Image (cartoon, rainbow, N blue to C red):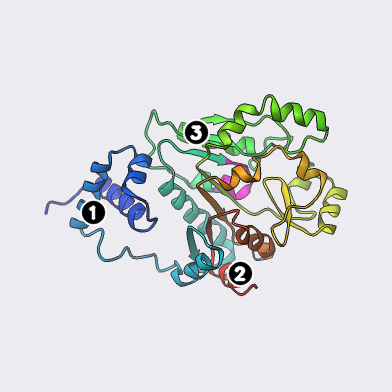
Amino acid sequence: MPSIDAETKKLLIHVATMKYKLDMTQKEIADRLGYSSMQISRLIDRAKKEGIVRIEIESSPSVDDELGEKLKKKYNLLDVYVFQSMNPDSQFNRLVSEAAAYMDLIIGQSDVVGLAGGRTEMKIISEMNLPVIKSGNKLVVVQLAGGFLDFSSSSPFSTLHEFSLKFGAKGYFLPTPFYVKNPSAFDELWNGSLAEIRKLWRKCTVTVNGIGTIGSNSLFIKQNAVSCSQMDDLVSKGAVGNLLGRWYDRNGEFIDCDLNRQATSIPVDDFMNINRRVLVSEDQDRLQAINAVLSKGMYNVFITTAAVAESLIGRK
């Protein structure tokens, strides 16, 4: 059999991984890559003939499939990738690279990608390539939560701008702060200028997020979106983390507080309807927050390290 060029081999591996590792149907693959189902069928057949697909697709030695299966079963997850813990100095960068590779696999020509900012999200975008995205694509990116006062690299505005610029996606910004305190102003925004972007939220197909911290080191404190007294109040009420600005306790229940009523972010029900909700974290000090959102099904894909996986599996 004549040798295949590098680009063709890359495409065959991509299609085979989507088919046999992500359990996607040929139609789903075709829709994401911009091919017909017949073309995908032929590519899968060729991948078999070229020896790219055998009885199984081998995982990287650094992937712990056993821990991944345990997490998948415990939290009823769609996909889980667990990587062996490594040097703390390089662990975050490695995890980000693996998360970016996963996003490269699942984002297709017509997806609506939801972004909300943060250090992890911005780093993942910088590592992503989206090899199947072609010029003239129908890719859309929409901001899922309001922003901060400045345009730091971790702000939602910055991450959405970076994604739009890098991949030629049509971007939809949310020109509001994270919280709107005045009830009448909130209602006017929610039912007025935000009406169109709320429709886009319901069309969102994929999102990727990290887990923020709580307390004085929270990005919300550093960006003056939440005051120190408000944070103290959240902590006293049992808050362990937030879902796009909405604060929840260790059981994944949302705190009864003004901030949750003032958040200009995608409603929880709409967020839960996003097909792939990807959580990326290697933080041992955020286990309560991670366990809460996974237990409640807020995310259905989890990318993490073996150390975090083992700690979560050991939790009751």
- Label 3, residues with CA under 10 Å away: few <14, some 14-19, many ≥20: many
Question: Horizontal placement of 152 versus 29: left or right?
Answer: right
- Name the residue tied to disc 3: 140
Residue occupying the point 43% across, 35% down: 110
Discs 3, 1 touching: Cβ within 8 Å: no
Considering every residue shown, the one lying at the far top of the view is 192
| Stretch of the chain drawn in magenta | 115-123
Q: Amino acid at mark 1?
A: Ala
Q: Amino acid at mark 3?
A: Val
Q: Earlier in the sequence, mark 3 or mark 1?
A: 1
Task: Specify whether residue 116 is painted magenta.
Answer: yes
Discs 2, 1 touching: Cβ within 8 Å: no
Residue occupying the point 56% across, 64% down: 75
**Mark on residue 47?**
1
Q: Amino acid at mark 2?
A: Leu
- Name the residue tied to disc 2: 312
Dot 2 falls on a residue whose secondary structure is helix
Dot 3 falls on a residue whose secondary structure is strand
Q: Position of residue 298 (x, y in %)?
A: 60, 53
Dot 1 falls on a residue whose secondary structure is helix
Residue 132: which quarter of the image? top left
